[in-house]
Image (spheres, grey):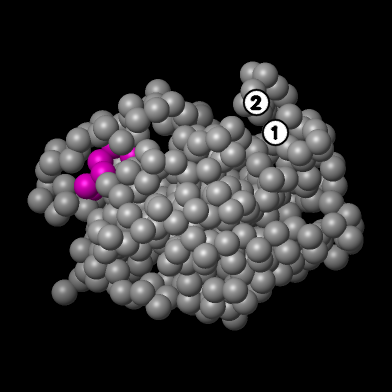
Amino acid sequence: MQPDLFTPVRLGRYSLNNRLVMAPLTRNRAGAGNVPQAMNVEYYRQRASAGLIISEGSQISATAVGYLGTPGIHSPEQIAGWKQVTDAVHDRNGHIFLQLWHCGRVSHPSLLPNNMLPVAPSAIRPEGHAHTMEGTQDFVTPHALTLEEIPGIISDFRVAAKNALAAGFDGVEIHAANGYLIDQFIRDGSNQRTDEYGGSLKNRSRLLLEITAAVTDVWGADRVGVRLSPINPFNDMYDSHPQQTFEFVANALNPFNLAYLHVTEWAGQDSGQGSPDFDFQRLRAVFNGTYITNGGYDKVSANAAIASGATDLVAFGKLFIANPDLPERFAIDAPLNTPDVNTFYGGNEAGYTDYPSM
């Protein structure tokens, strides 16, 4: 019998009772000090029937922030706030990983300590805008990290991984996607270094691999995942040979024996761009472990992808925003709530915890 969304699956050291993953979703609703608050606890509690929840991206340090109202995992208050979330999910027999996030150049001095410049592999200003307390402002030219500064970034990921352990998470996902710091190092459109972190694929992958080594040292590899986005143009990203680049990255991650590789197929189509030529099945074949895909799937297309072996699990974003009981609805083909795009980013409980369950 072919597997589907409701076939139990092994993910690292965990047995999941379904293959529906709640994708990491930035919702900009953290409290003061970027601390998870009561409505965040309720939001995740409502969605605990997912086989796995991957939390919204959480900054590894005060210098990693890129957006208002996004939670961190670097202060005692943030750890305590997240502990309430993980307790609520575990009370409903759910599993939840924390996504470790450094925004890199996708930030603004007004969001960072002492109005410091955002950091990046190279001093290349991305097109686009930051949303700050003073309103929308153009991105700035970032500070290119020196060789002496890079170990501090890796150390911040290690400390954040330890904090996630203290907060009661089941594992962590390293955010190496969507134009943030690690992705900025991987893709040649944003990395024009000439030292051991630039140029060759080996060098551009080095930061991800060093961070992965640090994080798996804390957690064990079977409780760590990595997220990639080979063709996502978000945050002014580009790579001249994405197939070659990301097959190299996936293969380089194999020796870790990670819990999973999480790949978003999104290519910016809904912003009017054509889909770049990329063979995700080749990427899937290169990676030896559990594979999670993401990118506009519904129940039918997700079941087809799992049955064909194209993926092991499927992550859903907008459908989980609007349907806290998405697995239950899928199981009986119940009607789905419609997501309210206007309440995706920021606000109160409206469009966050008030979507009805069946």
Image location (x, y in percent) of residue 18: 25, 64
Name the quadrant of the C terminus: top left
Mark 2 surroundings: few (<14), some (14-19) or many (≥20) residues within 10 A: some
Marks 1 and 2, how far apart in space? 7 Å
Q: Say what secondary structure mark 1 lies in.
A: helix
The residue indicated by pointer 1 is 111
Image location (x, y in percent) of residue 316: 35, 49
Please tell me in which quadrant of the rendered image residue 313 appears: bottom left
The residue indicated by pointer 2 is 132
Q: Is residue 322 above or below residue 157?
A: above
Pick whichever, 274 or 97, lies toward us.
97
Name the quadrant of the N terminus: bottom left
Mark 1 surroundings: few (<14), some (14-19) or many (≥20) residues within 10 A: many
Pick whichever, 234 or 111, lies toward us.
111
Amino acid under label 2? Thr
Whether the residues at callouts 1 and 2 have beta carbons within 8 Å, the answer is yes
Please provide the residue range marked out in magenta: 321-326
Q: Is residue 59 above or below residue 2?
A: above
Identify the residue shown where x is 25% and y is 59%.
Answer: 92
Left or right of 255, for residue 312: left
Q: Is residue 167 above or below residue 286?
A: above
Amino acid under label 1? Leu
Identify the residue shown where x is 84% and y is 43%.
Answer: 143
Left or right of 233, for residue 225: left
Pick whichever, 65 or 337, lies toward us.
65
Image location (x, y in percent) of residue 91: 28, 60
Image location (x, y in percent) of residue 223: 48, 72
- Quick check: can you spot residue 63? yes
- Quick check: can you spot residue 276? no
Identify the residue shown where x is 80% and y is 64%.
Answer: 151
